[in-house]
C-alpha cells in the first residue's frame, strides 16, 4: 500500500490526536460518497498524517461536494493553479484503485 510522504521542504511534523480529530471533523461532507472515500483514507493513513498533508486535505475540503467527488472518481484532475504536489499526492491516496483518465 502506498504511504503518505511529505513533499520536499514540507513540514513533516505529525499531527497530534487533537489536530487529527479536528481535521476529521472538518472533513465531514454532505455527500455520502465523499464521506466513504474520506473515512477509508483516514482509516489507512490518519495516524501518519503530517501538518503539510493536513493542509493539502484542507485545500480539498474547500471544494464543493460535487467537485470533490469528480476528483475522487477521476472524472477530472485538479487544476495546477490551486493544487500543488501535496494536494495531488493526498488526492491519489483518497481515490479508489483503477485506471487513470486518459491525457
Image (cartoon, grey):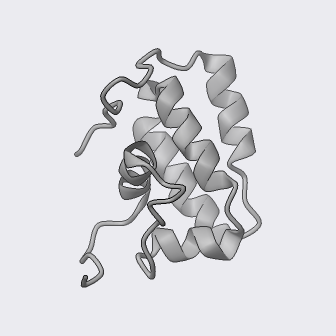
Q: Residue at x 66, y 53 (%)?
A: 61
Front position in the image: 78 or 48 = 78
Is residue 45 positioned above or below 61 on the image?
A: above
Residue drawn at x 59%, y 54% is: 60
Where does the C terminus fall, quadrant-wise?
bottom left
Image-quadrant location for residue 58 = top right
On the rendered structure, is 75 left or right of 38?
A: left
Horizontal placement of 25 versus 103: left or right?
right
Left or right position of 62 against 84: right
Q: How many marks?
A: 0
* Residue at the farthest front position: 81
> Relative to the observer, which residue lies in front, 81 or 26?
81
Residue 2: image x %, image y %? 24, 44
Give the quarter of the image for residue 35. Answer: bottom right
- At horizontal 33% and vertical 37% (from top left) the residue drawn is 4
Which picture quadrant has residue 30?
A: bottom right
Placement of 28 over or under 67, stated as above or below = above
Q: Residue at x 45, y 20 (%)?
A: 11
The picture places residue 23, in percent across and down from the top left corner, at: 67, 35
Q: In the rendering, at what x and y percent does residue 73 appear?
A: 45, 75
Amino acid at each position: 500500500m502506498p504511504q503518505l510522504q511529505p513533499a520536499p521542504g514540507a513540514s513533516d511534523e505529525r499531527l497530534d490526536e487533537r489536530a487529527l480529530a479536528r481535521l476529521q471533523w472538518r472533513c465531514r461532507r454532505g455527500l455520502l460518497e465523499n464521506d466513504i472515500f474520506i473515512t477509508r483514507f483516514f482509516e489507512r493513513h490518519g495516524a501518519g498524517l503530517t501538518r503539510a498533508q493536513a493542509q493539502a486535505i484542507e485545500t480539498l475540503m474547500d471544494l464543493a461536494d460535487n467537485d470533490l467527488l469528480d476528483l475522487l472518481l477521476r472524472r477530472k484532475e485538479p487544476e495546477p493553479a490551486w493544487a500543488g504536489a501535496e494536494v495531488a499526492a493526498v488526492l491519489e491516496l483518497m481515490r479508489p484503485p483503477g485506471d487513470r483518465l486518459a491525457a
